[in-house]
Amino acid sequence: MLNKKVVMPLAWGLTVAILGGLATDLGPWYHALKEPFWKPPDWLFGPMWSTIFIFSGIAWVGAKHFTSDASILSRLTVLFWLNALLNILWSVLYFRFERPDWALYEAGFLWLSVLAIFLTIRKVSTKNSLYILPYLIWVTIAIALNWDTVRLNGPFT
């Protein structure tokens, strides 16, 4: 039987991974995009996101271990689910709507949601907040990549 402290982080990670994966279409449109020279290979994105979701789940469960403050735990739950929505929305905008320009604007909100998660967890456990740093770094890299993609391929219609 799953510990109830683990259920929400597990559900969050699975939801984001599955829906984000379903929204990602590496079809002809994507392969026709001009890519910056520094873009990581496509095969790296799946393992990287999997690692980020695992680390984020560890951070969330760890934060729950260090506090019983209902307001902090509620805030974390809202922040993680908002983050899931923003993460999935980015994939939909970029891959399904074929609008990297819209996705770039939305990515700023995604980055802020990751920062808010980091800062909230840091209030109860600095050690557990460090598990969020790869997510913050990866989204920063993704924004730079998104920016270069828009610059190389825009305008989009």
Image (cartoon, rainbow, N blue to C red):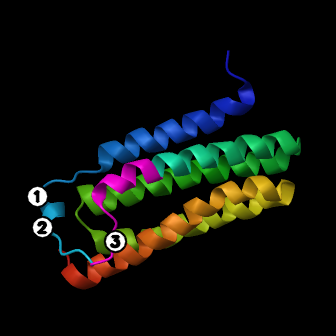
Q: In terms of secondary structure, where does tag 2 sit?
A: helix
Which callout, 1 or 3, points to the residue nearer the camera? 1
Q: Is residue 32 left or right of residue 131?
A: left
Q: Amino acid at mark 2?
A: Ala
Q: Which residue is mark 2?
A: 32
Residue range corresponding to the magenta coloring: 37-48
Q: Given the image, on which type of amino acid does mark 3 rest?
A: Trp
Residue position marked by numbered label 1 in the rendering: 28
In space, the residues marked 1 and 3 are separated at their CA atoms by 20 Å
Q: Do callouts 2 and 1 mark residues in contact (Cβ within 8 Å)? A: yes
Circle 3 packing at 10 Å, graded few (<14), some (14-19), many (20+), is some
User: What's the amino acid at mark 1?
Assistant: Pro
Tags 1 and 3 touching, CB below 8 Å: no
Circle 2 residues within 10 Å: few <14, some 14–19, many ≥20: few
29, 96: nearer the viewer: 29
Label 1 sits on a secondary structure element that is helix
Q: Position of residue 109 (x, y in %)?
A: 53, 68
Q: Residues within 10 Å of mark 1 (few under 14, many from 20)?
A: few
The residue that disc 3 covers is: 102
Q: Is residue 140 magenta?
A: no
First of labels 1, 3 by sequence position: 1
Residue 39 magenta: yes
* Residue at the farthest bottom position: 151
Image spot of residue 157 (x, y percent): 17, 74
Alpha-carbon distance for marks 3 and 2?
18 Å
Indicate which disc, 3 or 2, sits on the residue closer to the N terminus: 2
In the rendered structure, the answer to whether residue 67 lies left or right of residue 110 reads right
Q: Residue at x 49, y 36 (%)?
A: 14
